[in-house]
Image (spheres, rainbow, N blue to C red):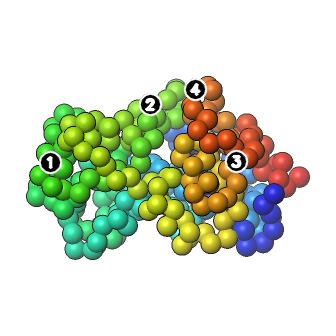
Amino acid sequence: MPGGDHETWVVDLDGVIWLAEQPIAGSAQAVDRLRRAGIRVLFATNNASPTVAELQERLAKAEISVEPDDLVTSAQAAASMLSPGTSAFPCADEGVIEALGNRGVEVVDHGPADAVVVGWTQRFDFDLMAEAAGLVRRGARFIGTNEDPTHPTPRGLLPGSGALLAAVATAAQATPQVAGKPHEPMVALLRARAPGAALIVGDRPSTDGALARRIGLPFALVRSGVTSDGREPMTVEPDEEAPDLAALVERHLS
């Protein structure tokens, strides 16, 4: 089992730390126990919607303090796929816009554009889909932050980025390149940011589990998110399971 100094746990946010910003009981105490044991916690999320500052604020409300380097997002992974000086049309929220700007990519609100980046947004409607699909049809590179079909909340599963991405892909009759877990752009960011990674913790086998297999690390499944109702396909068998992060940490550190 992972443990000891200079090791890192790569931990998901949605479904592990919180459900739609509502903290999962014991998650803050679990993170604190890991840190006091000398284990770094790196948060890796496929949620491309919030900015880094917004994630820091949400975590602070959950009684978890983080530095920007402790956060890796699918928005950052998507931005890493584009070269500085190119342009992109975001069918996405501020997290993607921030990541593109930090990468030196020009953000445009209409065509032409070198790329279209699709992420989760409540602004998604027919006009936004039509603009994104039209740009892809005219030759823009087609990038999705992630393909999670659902998003866990206290009131159940809501449509995720994958649902929006599928709509644009259908309208454009094109196949997107995907940036987030478990795909190579996110893998590259995590390898650079967490060379001492020892364990991947998440609630979704198809993303967190597949990421663990791709990096060559054990996968710990917590059932506090999308797998809580037993409907999420077990596409990757976990190396261990726990009801939540607190129970997982208790098992490792007690």
Q: Residues within 10 Å of mark 2 (few under 14, many from 20)?
A: few
Q: Which residue is mark 4?
A: 231
The answer to whether mark 4 and mark 2 are in CB contact below 8 A is no
Given the image, on which type of amino acid does mark 4 rest? Arg
Q: Secondary structure at mark 2?
A: strand
* First reached walking from the N terminus: tag 3 or tag 1: 1
Q: Quadrant of the N terminus?
A: bottom right
The mark closer to the camera, 4 or 2, is 4
Q: Secondary structure at mark 1?
A: helix
Given the image, on which type of amino acid does mark 3 rest? Ala
Residue 82 percent location from the top left of the image: 30, 67
Q: Which residue is mark 2?
A: 158
Give me the disc on residue 137: 1
Nearest to the observer: residue 68 or residue 92: 92
Residue 168 lies, with reference to residue 252, above or below; the image says: above
How far apart in space, not on screen, are marks 3 and 1 (Cα)? 40 Å
Work out which residue is located at the far right of the displayed protein and give it: 254
* First reached walking from the N terminus: tag 2 or tag 1: 1
How far apart in space, not on screen, are marks 4 and 2 (Cα)? 14 Å
Q: Residues within 10 Å of mark 4 (few under 14, many from 20)?
A: few
In the rendered structure, the answer to whether residue 147 lies left or right of residue 39 reads left
Give me the disc on residue 220: 3
Residue 153 percent location from the top left of the image: 52, 33
* First reached walking from the N terminus: tag 3 or tag 4: 3
Residue 229 percent location from the top left of the image: 61, 25
